[in-house]
Image (cartoon, helix red, strand yellow):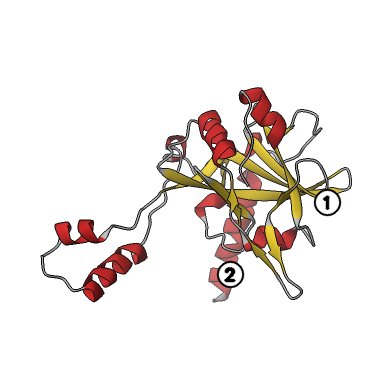
Amino acid sequence: MSTAEMDSYNERAAEIQRTFSYDGYQIVRREMFAHLREPSVVLRKDSITFNTACINGLEDAVYIQVMINRGQHRMVIRKCEENDKDSLRWCISKPDKRKSRKISSKEFSRRIYELMDWNDKCRYKVLGHRIEFEGDILYVFELDEPEIVFERKKKTVAQVTESTEVGLTQEQITERQNEEERMPVKPFYPDDWEHSFGIPVEKHRNVGIDSVDQYQSISDFGEAQGGGTVDG
């Protein structure tokens, strides 16, 4: 860059600095970026699964408690001991590593889907915020901000042969089924995200919890909704 170009560049930077304000800016939702290494949970109509990043981020926790805030549409998890009331095993613990496990939760998932008015043909992935509150490490999942994916079921042999030419061998049928399984799945997001990158700067706040008093454990959530237990 020549001296003249550098001078022009610096003048432009100085002008931007003099006139800059946050008016009109939106903080882009992190859901719009790749987040394989960020803590997340996937909720299905019959189960919930926390990813490996989530498991690893909560130190040596093998059992957790799940709390729901219906007013704020938040799910919070915290570490607990095996014999604590409402404890759930969320991972498989081995000497060398811990591995995520699917938690069967038909009744809990049904109530969450009803609370959020979700489509039971979809799964919902929600990113977690890792915070500290009163000495505990918590994950806060804001259920209003999910990545939504239609669940795709593997076609049966009959469905494959109906949609393709007859006379396929079993090997060809299996390959067709596997091809469909490998097809990319395109996620979509809530309608109000379509014309927005995120929340305006002046309205953006860091996630925080003032009190856990307004959260319900899974069992309390079930009783408030009309009874029942969580499978898992």
Question: Residue at image x 64%, y 56%?
Answer: 39
Give x and y (percent) for residue 22: 62, 41
Q: Is residue 152 left or right of residue 193?
A: left
Amino acid type of the residue tagged 1 in the rendering: Glu
Q: Is residue 110 left or right of residue 96?
A: left
Residue 169 appears in which quarter of the rendering? bottom left
Give x and y (percent) for residue 127: 60, 50
Q: Is residue 204 visible?
A: no
Give x and y (percent) for residue 80: 81, 49
Q: Badge 1: few (under 14), some or many (20 or more) residues near its Cα, within 10 Å? A: some
**Inter-mark Cα distance, 2 to 1:** 61 Å
Front of the two marks 2 and 1: 1
Q: Is residue 224 left or right of residue 137?
A: left
From this view, report whether residue 67 is shown above or below residue 59: above
Give x and y (percent) for residue 87: 76, 46
Pick whichever, 230 or 180, lies toward us.
230
From this view, report whether residue 4 is shown above or below residue 110: below
User: Which numbered marker is on residue 6?
Assistant: 2
Question: Residue at image x 62%, y 24%?
Answer: 225
Q: Quadrant of the N terminus?
A: bottom right
Q: Badge 2: few (under 14), some or many (20 or more) residues near its Cα, within 10 Å? A: few
Element assignment for label 1: loop
User: Which numbered marker is on residue 81?
Assistant: 1
